[in-house]
Image: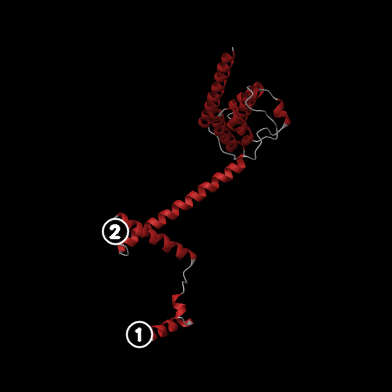
Amino acid sequence: MSDYQKEREQLKKILQQDEYQVYQQDNRSIIEKIYDHISSWISDLLDNMFQSFEPGSTAGNIIVVVLVISLAVILVLGILTFTTFMVRRKKWSSYQPFLKNTELSWDYQQHMRMVATYEAEANYQLAIRHQFLALLLRLEEYHLLTIQQWKTNREYYEELNKRDRHIASSFYRLAVQFEHVTYGEKTVQQTDYLKYQEQIDGLSTHIGQQQVHEKLGDH
């Protein structure tokens, strides 16, 4: 064995000793490792895309840091948005619009009379409630769904979606607004109520016209 090889082997043994291995250990935290990995990836990407970009320079480091922070903010906002959506979806699926048996015994006209009463009192929260319950009765009248006290709005939506996706989509928006007002204790202004009433009327008109066309098609 040559002197060079002997010296190399000796150096290798020295470097394998514990006191030298300590210096080679990665003592970074998980966050630091993730940051270094992402910043390195962004730096390489910018270096390949832009010839003027200088990795390791002050300006280059600032750009990388800004991009990493921006990605982190977008990720956090995305998680928060998704979490909020899932929570609302879970809540939305747990409410039954008909809370009492007496409400089930009312017909469409009775609910609409209550709508007129609450409109006159400027109690738009309850007016919206009876508008929505009247809509459910109208949908059942046209055999688009079957009302049961135990059913939630999500189950009504799924029934509608099997028959008519356009109607189901419109119903979904109305149901979400109904639940925000009824269970979320959202304050309802007259302008909000009139917009909701317009949407209800639009859907009712669409359903009525559709039923007429179907009847004419049967003849």
Identify the mark at residue 149; answer none if there is no mark.
none
- Counting from the top left corner in percent of width and height, residue 69 is at 41, 57
Residue at far front of view:
1
Q: Residue at x 58, y 45 (%)?
A: 87
- Counting from the top left corner in percent of width and height, residue 149 is at 70, 33
Indicate which disc, 2 or 1, sits on the residue closer to the N terminus. Answer: 1
On the rendered structure, is 62 left or right of 34?
Answer: left
Name which quarter of the figure residue 117 lies in: top right
User: Tag 1's secondary structure?
Assistant: helix
13 relative to 70, above or below: below
Nearer to us in this view, 213 or 87: 213
Nearer to us in this view, 180 or 90: 90
Q: Amino acid at mark 2?
A: Phe
Residue at far top of view:
219
Q: Residue at x 49, y 65 (%)?
A: 30
39 relative to 217, above or below: below
Q: Which residue is mark 1?
A: 4
Residue at far bottom of view:
3
User: Tag 2's secondary structure?
Assistant: loop
Q: Which residue is mark 2?
A: 53
Q: Are marks 2 and 1 in contact (CB under 8 Å)?
A: no
Q: Amino acid at mark 1?
A: Tyr
Distance between mark 2 and mark 1 Cα atoms: 42 Å
Q: Quadrant of the N terminus?
A: bottom left
- Counting from the top left corner in percent of width and height, residue 96 is at 66, 36
